[in-house]
Image: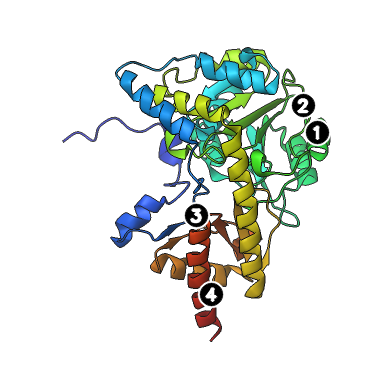
């Protein structure tokens, strides 16, 4: 039998890698359903009832392709942000948009800069399209903006990735600090600013950036505060010429009609969004109190999760495994210094209470 066509040199040289082990994969591996799903930073408070209603209605037209321009959704996002629809691109979640940016701006062999242990899907795209990664360690459990800027200049980086608020730490920089960071980057570098969690953050976290500035593309999602992770939909805001260039390479029918309908309806339900933000703030405080009661510290968080510092990578790994054996899915950051933590998504009160009981039992067992 023929060996078949060879893989490209690039693909053949990449290591086998999966950015995330999904909770579904854990259930298949263990043969047991999870009791608590607290590791993927989904909104455990669910989507807006208006979004669900709109999505059910959209199912009546599921035989048709969705609008490839996402015109109604782009118009509403533009209205909210006070910009032009020409400055907005819609994608099937931020992960899709990360790949779009890498394809558009990074030639094979060019450098991209990110934080060591930061959101891994950006790295996945950079390496998959032949780019070179420069990774900068966290400092004081936050993105080290000075070191990121220095690395970008040293490597002549074309793309710099920054999540603010950050995943997996939960920490954040103020908008004014991010604005100053932009001016320290090389003039031909793009700042890819991931604001997936910005709705949970304090006022002033989002920088005041002219959306026509070609040095910045900011991306946001409907997966977090809007509770539409399974629908896979997000958007980017950037200069009109950048957005127009994306039309040459983006998957034009990649965002389905049901997702577009749900996202549009969710934008119109500010009450639901505000309720989720308030519930998450309450839940973060509960998790912080729980950690303190067990002698652990927590990292400051402006997201819908809390990173609990359990005192070292070995203990974090052991607790992660023990929790999984009890049917509790959480995650831990993948690189030092953050790998001394476990990261727990904020859930409703009943989920927090069940997690607290299991976590307390495990910590007591580990200490005994």
The residue that mark 1 highlights is: 179
Earlier in the chain: of badge 4 and badge 1, it is 1
The crowd level at tag 3 (other Cα within 10 Å; few <14, some 14-19, many 20+) is: some
The residue depicted at 45 percent of the width and 67 percent of the height is: 323
The residue that mark 3 highlights is: 39
358 up-or-down from 104: above or below: below
75 up-or-down from 48: above or below: above
The residue that mark 2 highlights is: 209
Residue depth check, mark 4 versus mark 1: number of the one nearer the observer: 4
Can residue 132 be seen here? The reply is no
Q: Position of residue 226 (x, y in %)?
A: 54, 37
Q: In the structure shown, which secondary structural element does the residue marked by tag 3 occupy?
A: loop
The residue depicted at 82 percent of the width and 40 percent of the height is: 177
The crowd level at tag 2 (other Cα within 10 Å; few <14, some 14-19, many 20+) is: some
Question: Is 281 positioned to the left or the right of 96 in the image?
Answer: right
Earlier in the chain: of badge 1 and badge 3, it is 3
Q: Quadrant of residue 316?
A: bottom right
The residue that mark 4 highlights is: 360
Q: In the structure shown, which secondary structural element does the residue marked by tag 2 occupy?
A: loop
In front: 276, or 175? Answer: 276
């Amino acid at each position: 039998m023929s060996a078949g066509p060879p893989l490209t040199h690039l693909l053949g040289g990449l290591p086998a890698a999966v950015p995330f082990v999904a909770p579904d994969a854990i259930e298949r591996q263990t043969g047991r359903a999870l009791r608590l799903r607290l590791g993927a930073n989904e909104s455990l408070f669910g989507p807006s009832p208006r979004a669900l209603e709109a999505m059910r209605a959209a199912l009546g037209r599921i035989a048709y392709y969705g609008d490839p321009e996402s015109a109604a959704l782009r118009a509403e996002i533009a209205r909210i942000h006070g910009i032009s629809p020409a400055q907005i691109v819609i994608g099937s979640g931020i992960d899709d948009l990360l790949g779009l940016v890498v394809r558009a701006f990074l030639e094979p062999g060019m450098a991209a800069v990110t934080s060591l242990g930061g959101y891994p899907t950006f790295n996945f795209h950079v390496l998959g399209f032949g780019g070179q990664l420069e990774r900068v360690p966290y400092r004081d459990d936050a993105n080290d903006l000075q070191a990121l800027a220095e690395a970008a200049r040293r490597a002549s980086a074309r793309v710099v990735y920054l999540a603010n608020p950050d995943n997996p730490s939960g920490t954040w920089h103020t908008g004014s600090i991010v604005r100053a960071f932009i001016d320290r980057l090389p003039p031909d570098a793009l700042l890819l600013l991931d604001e997936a969690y910005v709705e949970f953050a304090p006022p002033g976290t989002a920088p005041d950036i002219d959306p026509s500035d070609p040095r910045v593309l900011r991306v946001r999602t409907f997966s977090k505060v809007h509770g539409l992770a399974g629908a896979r939909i997000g958007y980017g805001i950037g200069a009109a010429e950048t957005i127009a260039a994306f039309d040459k390479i983006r998957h034009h029918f990649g965002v389905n009609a049901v997702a577009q309908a749900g996202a549009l309806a969710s934008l119109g339900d500010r009450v639901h969004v505000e309720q989720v933000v308030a519930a998450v703030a309450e839940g973060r405080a509960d998790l912080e109190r729980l950690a303190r009661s067990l002698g652990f510290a927590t990292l400051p968080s402006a997201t819908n999760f809390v990173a609990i510092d359990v005192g070292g990578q070995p203990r974090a790994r052991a607790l992660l495994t023990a929790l999984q054996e009890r049917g509790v899915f959480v995650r831990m950051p993948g690189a030092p210094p953050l790998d001394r933590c476990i990261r727990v998504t904020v859930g409703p009160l009943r989920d927090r209470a069940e997690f607290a009981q299991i976590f307390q039992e495990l910590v007591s067992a580990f200490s005994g």
